[in-house]
Image (spheres, rainbow, N blue to C red):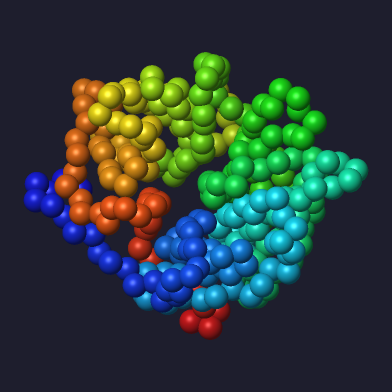
Amino acid sequence: MYQESPHVPDDLDFPCKDPLVDYNFVGSCDGLLCISGGARDLFLWNPSIRKSKKLPISGSNVHCSSYLAYGVGYNECQDDYKVVEVMGSSHSEYGFQNEFRVYSLRTNSWKMIQEYLGVIFCNDPAKFVNGRLHWIATRVSDKNDSWFISSLNLVDETYENVGLPDLVYGNFDWELGILGGNLCVFCDYYKVQMDVWVMKAYGLVESWTKVASIPYFRAIEHSPFPVFISHNDEILLQHGSSLLIYNSTDNTFKHPQVQIHHGYEIQFSLYTKSLVSPHFVED
């Protein structure tokens, strides 16, 4: 990222390349990437060891769903990697019903867990922090349309809410992220700034800290999205199909010369190399 000459990224050869299928990144954990292919197919793929696996069908009726949300995490107690599928659909009594299905890499099978009724989840990929998957959610009965952070504990499969930082409310959008292994909230005050909040101690509301306010400037059409924060507080940002580096100390931007294929819809995510196999038990 700091080379003066243009850097050509490595081309990772994803084994499933059907031109008629829309592939999307839906999560990662310990070097395992989870890729969705169309409405039903899910793949686990470790590019470092060039191994992939198509997961069995979860059994959910995706054609009746209002949305699908996913998350990928690790259950340390069971030494098992999990993929969670949330299917939201209409429900006559509660107005909305969420079916949670959990895939175990160790057993290569899915199971249903306790429902979470009356809540609508944002379908962005869940953020895995402190053994829990986190989504933005809102209650169907909430006429103010206020959103909160909902978590799923992968050990005991229970749901909890995580307290938000003391946000300055107004006209803004917000998303969840992970920076330095900590849960983050990105508040985008359109054409003004993006505030970056980090939960320094998981579960303690008072530990939310605003680490940066990234200013808007006219050269940027779309709000940048933080991907990574370095030890010296530089923040790597996605801006459309390119990358920026923001230094919160001197309030400056750098444009690394990275040759990315333009003209495509680009998804960025932080990935750590590992030897974890998507076949896990067999290997």
Q: Residue at x 25, y 64 (%)?
A: 10
List the single residue furthest toward the right. 93
Tell me if residue 195 can be seen. Answer: no
Q: Position of residue 252 (x, y in %)?
A: 21, 27
In depth, the one of 119 and 185 nearer the eye is 119
Judge left or right: residue 220 versus residue 226: left
Q: Is residue 67 above or below residue 244?
A: below
Question: x%, y% of residue 216?
Answer: 33, 24
Q: Nearer the viewer, residue 122 or 65?
A: 65
**Relative vertical location of residue 251 with respect to residue 133 in this rendering, above or below:** above
At horizontal 69% and vertical 68% (from top left) the residue drawn is: 58
Toward the viewer: 110 or 192?
A: 192
Seen in the image, is 99 located left or right of residue 187? right
Q: Residue furthest bottom?
A: 282
**Is 9 above or below relative to 189?**
below
Q: How many marks?
A: 0
Instruction: Give the quadrant of residue 86.
Output: bottom right
For the point 38% across and 19% down, the residue is: 192
What residue lies at 32% left-to-right and 68% top-to-bottom? 12
Residue 177 horizontal/vertical position (percent): 47, 40
In the picture as drawn, the residue positioned furthest to the left comes out as 5
| Image location (x, y in percent) of residue 250 | 21, 23
User: Is residue 240 visible to the viewer in this orientation of the structure?
Assistant: yes
Q: Quadrant of residue 249?
A: top left
Q: Is residue 253 left or right of residue 240?
A: left
